[in-house]
Image: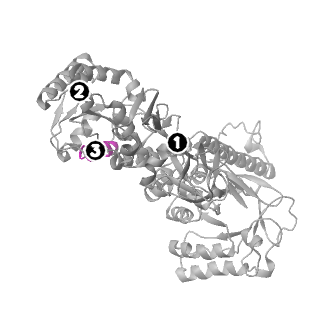
Amino acid sequence: MTRFLFSKGHDGPIRQGEFETSDKRIDLPALSGPGTDLPFCVLDREFCRESLSLLALPPLTTKSSVPIGSEPFFLPSIPNTSLFNAESHRSLLKYQMSVLEYSDSETCSRAVLRTNPNLPLDTFTAFISEGNSFGIRSSSFQFDGDLGQKDLHSIRLRVSTPLSWTVFALGRIEPYMLPLLIYLGFDIIDVSRAQEAAAQDIRLWKFVPETFDEHSEERFCSCPACNDVIINNLQDKQRFDVLFHHNLTLYRVILSQSIQMANNGRLRWFIESLTHANPNMVGFLRRIDSIFYSYLEEFTPTAGSGIVPLIGPESYFAPLVRRFRDFVKNRYQPPTQKKAVLLLPCSARKPYSDSRSHKRFQRAIDSALGSVKHQLSEVILTSPLGLVPRELERIFPAANYDIPVTGNWDAEELHIAADTLVDHLGKFDKSVPVVAHATGGYRSIIELAENKIRQNIIYTEISGSATRRESLTNLSKTLEKLKRDQNLEPSPSTELRDTLRATADFQFGTSAGNLLIPDKAKLKGKLYRMVLSKIDKEQTCAFVASNGSLSLTLYGGELIQPLEKYWARFEGAKVRGGALFAVGVKNADYSIRPGDEVIVLNEDNNVVAVGRSEMSGREMCELDYGEAISFRHKVK
């Protein structure tokens, strides 16, 4: 039995939980292979097993030879060849099933289905229902360590596996592959490579392995196996033992690092940092981001409080970044009273309004526009998010990302930002003027997009940098002229309403802002602290500056219920306790992501609670363990 227990969301598809037998539990993700808590054992070759083992059934195993007990076992191996057609693969899968014929459900639940990198995807997905009917809940996938098409296809098969199944990664898995496989949701990972490398006289390191000869200078290693040992002075058996224990320790260290990074919301950053030392990993990760974006995004949290490092080109299409660009493109709508657009550079400090440069921009804007400044739509250009509307500057990850600043933009990030700008300005009427107060790479973005922009672009005159006094004076003069030319008239400030509506649309979808914050809503508070929205003295939601998002009340949940999004339903009239667990979820919106604000409906379709999702909507429906939603408010 496998239990996936998520707490406070999770960092991508990684699954943290427990692997259980009748007498032992192992935390997931876990390592398997020689020297681990899950060693391999071939049936009928090794009869004495003092601890839990992963049994591998030989190819000619019959149904009368299925092992009894509580240990998981791999069904008979499939030859790994490209000569088989789809029908041959189906026959081999059926052969594995035949071993389980007449077995009880408990025995079948211990079985691990074997696949190989040549197994057609449609053959595998069609066979899953048959495996489910037998009671199989585990599958294994083979890797050759080359990070080529075969390894990519094994990931494709894994992505198509039911969420409730335990997933094994077998084969030649190098140390630098381990965080990526953990991130992709492999639960138990074969590290037999540690033993193989030791037999080949190789000491593994995170990036480049080390080989030995009489002329080589050994690297220093402080691990218990290598401490005060000169490898070249050891005899064969001692040498093997030292190398094997060093190699295995390395895998354990990387596993521990990966789990810690995931708990801190930095597993993706950890993986990206490893790609910089391995060209194969760079291309492999980019293909994964492109091909499996929907899968990765589904389990990527929508909320967070820590710094999000975006350290290079591998971040340009990371799920968190791409989703933000998609949401700004598809969910953000400029407030109707905006009569002009101002393009500004980003700042190192987040949110931008707290930075010294943007405080200077605001003083220049205030002096020029005064009480009509809310009719100006401020847009901050940045990489790799593309752009951030001022109303969304406090939302995750716009308020959290950190990038290396060199002043030089590469062609890819320029094109990403330019395409984003074209889409954004397409939401404004072509008569709306666009003021560009930008230089360097920021101006290059605008110039690259200019021939696709319908509006007239007015470039301010910049002397040196955008924040110098002369430049800010020129910005004020440009805005003053704009005010006269556009006949902008004073009117009440809409800053709070604009921000809360934009945030609601970003969180819940277009039109959520008008439902939660209608014209009659009363708003009170400060954007850098908290803003409350009330209708007839009843609170609908609160904007929390620390995370830039809205928290709902029960009344607010009822207001957005007609959108039919971000809901989970359970069987019963009222919820109890402080959370709803996956086992109690009858159905849920599959667009829910970890960290989302969600509403809980009872059997009569009434809103009985609101809170934060700790897993995706699909996980709520397919898993039997783990906290699905932590409540903020509930019907008493």
Q: Residues within 10 Å of mark 1 (few under 14, many from 20)?
A: some
First in sequence, mark 2 or 1: give its number.
1
Q: Is residue 255 visible?
A: yes
Q: Amino acid at mark 3?
A: His
Queried whether the magenta region covers residue 247, the answer comes back as: no
Q: Residues within 10 Å of mark 3 (few under 14, many from 20)?
A: many
Residue 256 x/y as whole percent: 67, 43
Which circle marks residue 87 in the picture? none
Q: Secondary structure at mark 3?
A: helix
Left/right of residue 328 with respect to residue 233 in the rendered view? left
Q: Secondary structure at mark 1?
A: helix
Q: Amino acid at mark 1?
A: Trp
Residue 599 x/y as whole percent: 52, 49
Disc 3 to disc 1, C-alpha distance: 28 Å
- Span shown in magenta: 413-426
Left/right of residue 177 with respect to residue 365 in the rendered view? right
Q: Secondary structure at mark 2?
A: helix
- The residue identified by callout 3 is 424
Numbered disc in front, either 2 or 3: 2
Which circle marks residue 269 in the picture? 1
> Residue at 15% across / 28% down in the picture?
482
Residue 179 x/y as whole percent: 59, 49
Report the residue that reaches farthest toward the left.
485
State if disc 1 and disc 2 touch (CB < 8 Å). Answer: no
